[in-house]
Each structure stands twice: as structure tokens, then as C-alpha cells.
Image (cartoon, rainbow, N blue to C red):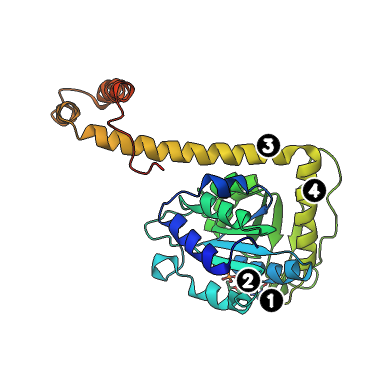
């Protein structure tokens, strides 16, 4: 590791507060494999990650974990359960686990998530695992940052989850049915078909039990195979480009929002807005007028530059 645990902890706290990663650290990223683990609450994502850490450590790999779970009942996303479960790794310098605060957050990623992934990458972790809750709308976000997306489900999910599943299926590189220990023996049969080599990745379905440890080694192999497939087919570079693009677009969006809010405070935009309220102007025309106004003034001066710049 090129950073002490203390330094990394401090760095992640700063990133969470919105301070950008330094260009020097960003230049050191791109070596870690990013593994996204998503799925409905309670299917056993954190328990599986705990098992994966054991397996990866046995292989001599170092692991960083970022947990984002707004469904946690504990305020601010302090995931007591996850902390306790993964606590046993806390003396291991090859493992770093961080739960992100998700207060007022809708699910998916937090704004700082890509930056924190970069930090763990720069710190030298071989694998960075990102756990998110797949609620049916936001799971595409984890696909924006991960090289490999593992979608976790469990037997006998309710109707609501079945509906959410279709969105999850779109992003799954590997599908895991966890809690296979709860299934009857016939159904629990491990699917052994290994993905074929070639251009197209045929998404495998694996059965695991985080309780007994069944299927964890296979899951590790399949995740390795997917990454090897991405690298060999040239798709890894494409995914990394997509991730970079998504991250920059998010940053541009927050700057734009800040600029718009700032510009709307001026007196002319205020007049336009009250004209809409008084039904003298329709919202569409107002947006068009303000668009010209805001972009025009941005071209003339830097008056509306967002506060979150470096
Ligand atoms: N029987 C059984 N229970 C499991 C398994 N994996 C997780 N659990 C339990 O399911 C509950 C939710 O697990 P957790 O890992 O917190 O799920 P997450 O919300 O997806 O992260 C906990 O009580 C776990 O002990 C499994 O493979 N079999
Ligand atoms: Mg969890």
C-alpha cells in the first residue's frame, strides 16, 4: 500500500465532504478491478462480500469495499450490521471497508463514490468492491463505475422485487441466487457451466450460500473470467471510457445546477419567474428565455461559476 490506513481514512472523509482527489493521485489509478455487487435489500450482499474477502485474501489479493445502503435503518447510513459482520477484517491491512453516509440520498451512488473508488485504486488495492441496493431505478449507476456487475437475488422474492428484477437483469454480468441453503436439494444444484471464450459473454447464473460458503469459490472464478473476457475482447477500455464520461457528466451537471440557481437569483430572471406564476408567460418560453440569458451571461463573464471548483 502506498498510503497508511490512517491516511486513506482521512482522504476518504475529505472526498465524502466534496473535496476533489488530487490530479497526482488520479494519475495513479486504473489498476484496480472494480466489482459492483447490487440487488434488493436482505438478499445477502454484505454477507457474500464478507465471504469474498476471505477468498480473495487467500489468493493474496488486497480488497477495498465501499458500502452504500440507504435502506439501512440507522441514520446517515452507518451500517451497524455490515460493520459488525465485516469487523473481523479490521486488523488486516489488506482490507479496507467504508460505509458511506446516505442521508437524503435516493439510492444508487453518492456523488463522491467514483472519487472514493479512485482513492482505493490509487492506494493500491487489487479489487474494489462497491455494494449498492438495487431498487429498480438507480442500479444503472453502479454499472457506470464497475467493470463487472454481480446482481444478487434470493429464492422466493416478493412481487415488488420481481418487478425490479428486469432493470437489474439489464446490467448483470453475473447473476447470483444466494441463500441456496434455503432451497430444496434439487433446486440447490450448482450450475457448473462455465462461460465460453469468445466475443459474447453469456451471463452465468450461480447459486451461493453466504451462510455455508457454498459457491463462493465459483463466484470468484466467474468474476475473474468476466474480467479476463473484458480485457481480451477490448471491452474493458470501453467500460472505463464510459465510467470516465459518466463521472465528468455528473460533475458538469452539478456545476450547471449551481450556475442556474445562482443566475436565477438576479432581478431579470426573478421577473421572468413571477411572470410564469402570474400566467403572463408559459414555463416553456420562460425556460427558453432564461437559457439564452444564463448561457449568454456565462459567455460574457465568470460570474456564475459553481462553488465546487477545485
Ligand atoms: N440462510 C441464509 N441466510 C443468509 C445468507 N446470506 C445472508 N443471509 C442472512 O440474510 C440477512 C441479510 O443479509 P445481508 O448480507 O445484510 O444482506 P444485504 O442487505 O443484501 O447486504 C442476514 O440476516 C444474513 O445473515 C445465506 O446464504 N443463507
Ligand atoms: Mg448490505
Q: Residues within 10 Å of mark 3 (few under 14, many from 20)?
A: few
Number of the front mark, 1 or 4: 4
Residue at 27 percent across and 24 percent down: it is 290
Does the residue at mark 2 contact the one at mark 4 (Cβ under 8 Å)? no
Which residue lies under the disc numbered 1? 211
Number of the front mark, 2 or 3: 3
Gap in Å between the C-alphas at discs 2 and 4? 25 Å
Element class at badge 1: loop
Gap in Å between the C-alphas at discs 1 and 3? 36 Å
Q: Position of residue 97 (x, y in %)?
A: 57, 67
Q: Nearer the viewer, residue 269 or 305?
A: 305
Residue at 42 percent across and 53 percent down: it is 106
Q: Earlier in the sequence, mark 1 or mark 2?
A: 2
Does the residue at mark 4 contact the one at mark 3 (Cβ under 8 Å)? no
Q: Earlier in the sequence, mark 2 or mark 4?
A: 2
Q: Is residue 107 visible?
A: yes
Q: Is mark 2 within 8 Å of ligand 1?
A: yes
Gap in Å between the C-alphas at discs 4 and 3? 14 Å
Which residue lies under the disc numbered 3? 238
Gap in Å between the C-alphas at discs 1 and 2? 8 Å
Which quadrant of the figure contains the N terminus? bottom right
Which residue lies under the disc numbered 2? 47
Amino acid at each position: 500500500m502506498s498510503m497508511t490506513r490512517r491516511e486513506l481514512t482521512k482522504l476518504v472523509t475529505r472526498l465524502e465532504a466534496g473535496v476533489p482527489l488530487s490530479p497526482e493521485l488520479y494519475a495513479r489509478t486504473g489498476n484496480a478491478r472494480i466489482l459492483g455487487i447490487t440487488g434488493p435489500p436482505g438478499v445477502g450482499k454484505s454477507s457474500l462480500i464478507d465471504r469474498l474477502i476471505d477468498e480473495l485474501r487467500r489468493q493474496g489479493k488486497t480488497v477495498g469495499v465501499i458500502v452504500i445502503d440507504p435502506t439501512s435503518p440507522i441514520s446517515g447510513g452507518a451500517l451497524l450490521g455490515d460493520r459488525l459482520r465485516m469487523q473481523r477484517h479490521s486488523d488486516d491491512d489488506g482490507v479496507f471497508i467504508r460505509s458511506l453516509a446516505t442521508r437524503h440520498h435516493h439510492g444508487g451512488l453518492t456523488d463522491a463514490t467514483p472519487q472514493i473508488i479512485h482513492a482505493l485504486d490509487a492506494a493500491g488495492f487489487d479489487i474494489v468492491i462497491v455494494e449498492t441496493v438495487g431498487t429498480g431505478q438507480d442500479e444503472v449507476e453502479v454499472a457506470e463505475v464497475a467493470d463487472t456487475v454481480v446482481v444478487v437475488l434470493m429464492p422466493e422474492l416478493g412481487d415488488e422485487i420481481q418487478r425490479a428484477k428486469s432493470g437489474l437483469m439489464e446490467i448483470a454480468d453475473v447473476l447470483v441466487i444466494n441463500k441456496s441453503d434455503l432451497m430444496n436439494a434439487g433446486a440447490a444444484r450448482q450450475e457448473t457451466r462455465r462461460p465460453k471464450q469468445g466475443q459474447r459473454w453469456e451471463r452465468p447464473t450461480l447459486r451461493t450460500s453466504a451462510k455455508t460458503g457454498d459457491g463462493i469459490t465459483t463466484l470468484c472464478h466467474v468474476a475473474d473470467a468476466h474480467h479476463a473476457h473484458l480485457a481480451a475482447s477490448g471491452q474493458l477500455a470501453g467500460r472505463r471510457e464510459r465510467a470516465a464520461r459518466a463521472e465528468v457528466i455528473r460533475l458538469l451537471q452539478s456545476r450547471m445546477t449551481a450556475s442556474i440557481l445562482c443566475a436565477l437569483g438576479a432581478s431579470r430572471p426573478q421577473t421572468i419567474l413571477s411572470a410564469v406564476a402570474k400566467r403572463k408567460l408559459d414555463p416553456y418560453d420562460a425556460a427558453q428565455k432564461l437559457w439564452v440569458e444564463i448561457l449568454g451571461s456565462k459567455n460574457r463573464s465568470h460570474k456564475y461559476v459553481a462553488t465546487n471548483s477545485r
